[in-house]
Amino acid sequence: MKHPDPLIQETLDVWMPRFLNGGIHYYDIQKATGRMKSWDDWGPEWTKMAEMHEALAEEAWQAGRRISSVQAFQTAARYYHMAYFIYTRDPEVHDRGLRKMLECYDRILGYMEPSVEKVTIPFEDTFFVGLFSRPKTESPPPVVIFIPGLDSTKEGRHNARGTYMRRGMAVLSIDAPGQGETSLRLKIRPDYEKSVGAAIDYLESRADVDVDRVGINGASLGGYYAPRAAAFEKRVIACVGNCGPFDWSEVFEIIPQVTREAYIHYAGAKSREEAFEQSKTMTLKGAAKNITCPLLIVHGKQDPLIPWEQGKRIVDEASSQDKQFILFDEGNHGCNNIQYKAGPLVADWLAMQLGGTVS
């Protein structure tokens, strides 16, 4: 697919596998981008596409076709996310897309399969939010905390819950500061271990999970957040990072322009220069050596955002006696183009580390 606007073309080149894996229909991508003349049209055109699917959901709901309605609301939520996730130039369009994504998703929470519970997690003098699901087991299962990246959310990450629940693990997907729903109130901060610590504190309040068996799984910028949390939050007993940076400032100038704009927005920076200075705090220098739990880092050699050497450096500097770096030669960012390889590998590894099942 080709587009004359370089920012739209770059976005399609980088994220097309992610769009398709995440339930965005190829025909709709063609229609929406075909109406766009420039990047300024990205948010508005995807909003129109989302509104169309929301109308289909409402029509099915009013007709009593609940199954079709739930499916259409899920699609609408994904498309509202498309309207805002890296489109920050128009704050009104961005914030409306985020709020509508939440509205569509939250409306059908009670109809999700596997079931989903929305939870509030106390954090310092405020809170953040998460989505929780657990398998139907007699004894409390282990838990995997899913960590979004710069432009993903708990809703998108929680789509993978079935894969983990089938392996006997509960899933808690979180929107911590600067992420998804919580980004409306709190900006990005480098000390993600405090967010993971708050999430584990919350899990300790539940009797239906085993808080002695908690793993974390982060992708993209979440691939920095997860190792950072493992370095300082010792209740984490296994950590996975997928295509994350060792040092965000080292990739700041090579990431796509729209990704850089998104970071400026979610970090609350007033300028590119201020954002770059803030990015210097997003580093595992001096921290990676504190990672002692089992560690798995996966990376795609064709990743155009985060060079694979960044992921290898995390493993090289970690002190864990059980650490692996797996490089997929054909993998792109997040290994979205080969999820059939990376996805099961990560899920099986966490199941074996946490005492889940792989058979």
Image (spheres, grey):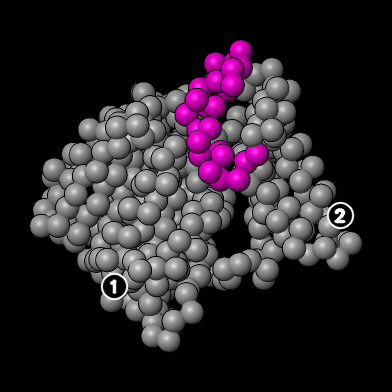
Q: Quadrant of the N terminus?
A: top right
The span shown in magenta is 1-25
Closest to the observer, 210 or 161: 161
In the rendered image, which quarter is residue 106 located in?
A: bottom right
Query: Which residue has dot 2 on it?
Result: 59
- Residue kind at label 2, given as amino acid type: Glu
Left or right, residue 127 beside residue 298? right
Instruction: Return the mark for residue 355.
Output: 1
Magenta span main SS: helix
Closest to the observer, 341 or 266: 341
Question: How many residues crowd mark 2 within 10 Å: few (<14), some (14–19), many (20+)?
Answer: some
Can residue 358 be seen from the camera position used here? Answer: yes
Residue 256 in percent (x, y) is at: 45, 25
Residue 100 in percent (x, y) is at: 70, 50
- Residue kind at label 1, given as amino acid type: Gly
In the rendered image, which quarter is residue 60 located in?
A: bottom right
Q: Residue at x 57, y 50 (%)?
A: 184
In the rendered image, which quarter is residue 142 located in?
A: bottom left
Q: Residue at x 50, y 46 (%)?
A: 152
